[in-house]
C-alpha cells in the first residue's frame, strides 16, 4: 500500500508539470486549449525516437519541449491569425497531432526498455550509502518493501519546483503581466497598444512546452511512448488545477501554482486509492477521473451555498432580536 502511494506521488509530481501548463492556458489566458492531449504524446514521441536514435536523454528532452512549443504556437496561430474559435483550434490541432505523432514515431509504440534514459542515468549517480540509509529507514517504520526510486522523486521535486518558480517569475515580468491582462480583459490591454495575438501565441506555446516536457518524462520513466497515451490528459490537468485550488486556494500566483502541484499529487493518490476498491478495475480510471472532477467542481459551490444560507439565517435571527428588543 505504502509503495503504491509512493508511486502515486512520483507520477503526480511529473503530471504536475503538465497541470502547470494547463493552468497557464485555462486560468491565466482564459484559453480552452485541447491541444494538450496531442502535445503530451508529441513530447513523449520526440523524446523516445530521439533516444532510440542515439541522442543523449537531456538533449532529447529539450527537443520534446521545442516540439511542444511549436505545436502550441500553431494552435495560437489558428486562433489569432486564422480567426478560428479557441476551442475548435485546439481540437483541430489535437486531431492533426495524432497523425503527426504517428509520423514521428513511425509506429504506435516506441519502447525504451533497453535504452538509457534520463532516469537510468540518475540512478547511476545515486550514492549507494544514501540509498541503503533510506531503504533501512523505510523498512524500520514498517512500510514494507522499499521503493527503488528515491532519486527520481527527489529529482522530479526539484524540476517541478524550478518550473513553478520560473512560472511565478515569468508571470510577474512585463510580458507575464500583459499575458495575465490578456486573459482578464483582452480589449483593455489592446487599448494600451499590447499585441494580444502575439501574447496568446506565446502563452499557448509555453503551456504546451510544459505539457510536452511532462510527456517526455513519463515516456522515460515508463519505458515507452504510445500514440494513445495522451487521451484524457486535458481532464487530468483540469482535475489537478481544480482540486488544487479547492484545497489550497488561489489568492496569488505563487499560491495558485503550488496548489496545482499539490492538486496533481492529491489526484494521483485519490486515483490509486480508488483503484484498490474491490468493485473498481483499471479500465474504470477515466470514470474515476470524471467523478473526481465533478466532485471538485460541485463541492465548493454546495459548501458556499450552505455558508451563505447560514449567514442569511444568522442575519435574520439578529434582525428578529433587534425587533424584539425595540
Image: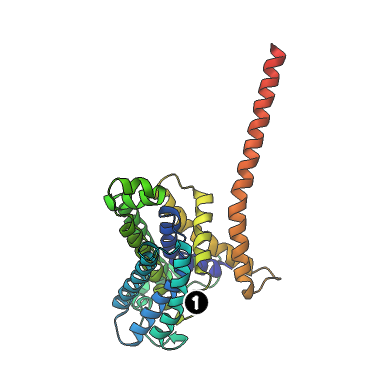
Q: Can the viewer see residue 280?
A: yes
Q: Is residue 108 left or right of residue 68?
A: right
Residue 221 coordinates in the image, percent (x, y): 43, 76
Q: Quadrant of residue 270?
A: bottom right
Helix, strand or loop for disc 1: loop
Total marks drawn?
1
- Residue at 51% from the left image edge and 79% from the top image edge: 228
Q: Is residue 71 left or right of residue 174?
A: right
Residue occupied by mark 1: 229
The answer to which quarter of the image holds residue 282 is bottom right
In this rendered view, identify the residue nearer to me: 79 or 262: 79
Applied colour scheme: rainbow
Measuring from the top left, give residue 216's x and y in whole percent. Answer: 39, 74
Measured from the top left, where is residue 236 in percent x and y? 52, 65
Q: Residue at point 48% right, 72% down? A: 147
Looking at the image, is 120 positioned above or below residue 291?
Answer: below
Q: Is residue 128 above or below residue 190?
A: below
Of residues 80 and 139, the one drawn nearer to the viewer in this rendering: 80
Residue furthest toward the top?
326
Q: Quadrant of the C terminus?
A: top right
On the rendered image, what quadrant is the N terminus found in?
bottom right
| Residue 279 shown left or right of residue 165 in the figure | right
x then y, percent, for residue 303: 62, 44
Return the residue nearer the eye: 79 or 49: 79
Q: Residues within 10 Å of mark 1 (few under 14, many from 20)?
A: some
Q: Quadrant of residue 153?
A: bottom left
Inspect this view and state whether residue 155 appears. Answer: no
Residue extending farthest front: 83
Pick whichever, 151 or 323, lies toward us: 323
Amino acid at each position: 500500500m505504502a509503495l503504491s502511494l509512493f508511486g502515486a506521488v512520483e507520477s503526480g509530481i511529473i503530471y504536475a508539470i503538465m497541470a502547470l501548463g494547463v493552468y497557464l492556458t485555462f486560468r491565466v489566458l482564459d484559453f480552452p486549449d485541447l491541444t494538450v492531449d496531442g502535445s503530451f504524446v508529441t513530447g513523449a514521441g520526440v523524446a523516445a525516437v530521439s533516444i532510440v536514435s542515439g541522442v543523449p536523454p537531456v538533449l532529447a528532452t529539450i527537443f520534446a519541449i521545442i516540439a511542444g512549443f511549436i505545436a502550441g504556437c500553431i494552435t495560437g496561430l489558428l486562433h489569432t491569425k486564422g480567426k478560428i474559435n479557441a476551442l475548435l483550434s485546439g481540437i483541430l490541432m489535437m486531431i492533426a497531432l495524432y497523425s503527426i505523432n504517428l509520423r514521428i514515431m513511425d509506429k504506435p509504440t516506441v519502447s525504451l526498455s533497453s535504452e538509457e534514459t534520463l532516469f537510468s542515468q540518475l540512478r547511476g549517480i545515486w550514492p549507494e550509502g544514501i540509498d541503503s540509509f533510506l531503504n533501512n529507514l523505510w523498512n524500520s517504520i514498517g512500510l514494507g518493501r522499499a521503493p527503488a526510486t528515491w532519486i527520481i522523486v527527489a529529482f522530479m521535486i526539484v524540476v517541478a519546483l524550478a518550473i513553478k518558480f520560473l512560472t511565478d517569475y515569468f508571470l510577474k515580468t512585463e510580458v507575464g503581466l500583459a499575458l495575465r491582462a490578456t486573459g482578464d480583459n483582452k480589449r483593455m490591454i489592446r487599448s494600451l497598444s499590447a499585441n494580444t495575438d502575439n501574447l496568446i501565441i506565446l502563452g499557448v506555446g509555453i503551456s504546451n512546452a510544459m505539457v510536452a516536457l511532462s510527456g517526455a518524462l513519463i515516456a522515460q520513466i515508463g519505458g515507452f511512448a504510445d500514440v494513445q497515451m495522451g487521451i484524457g490528459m486535458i481532464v487530468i490537468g483540469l482535475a489537478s488545477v481544480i482540486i488544487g485550488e479547492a484545497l489550497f486556494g488561489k489568492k496569488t500566483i505563487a499560491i495558485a501554482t503550488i496548489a496545482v502541484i499539490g492538486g496533481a499529487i492529491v489526484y494521483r493518490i485519490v486515483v490509486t486509492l480508488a483503484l484498490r476498491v474491490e468493485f473498481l478495475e483499471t479500465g474504470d480510471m477515466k470514470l474515476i477521473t470524471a467523478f473526481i472532477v465533478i466532485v471538485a467542481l460541485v463541492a465548493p459551490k454546495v459548501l458556499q451555498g450552505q455558508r451563505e444560507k447560514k449567514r442569511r439565517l444568522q442575519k435574520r435571527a439578529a434582525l428578529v432580536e433587534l425587533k424584539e428588543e425595540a
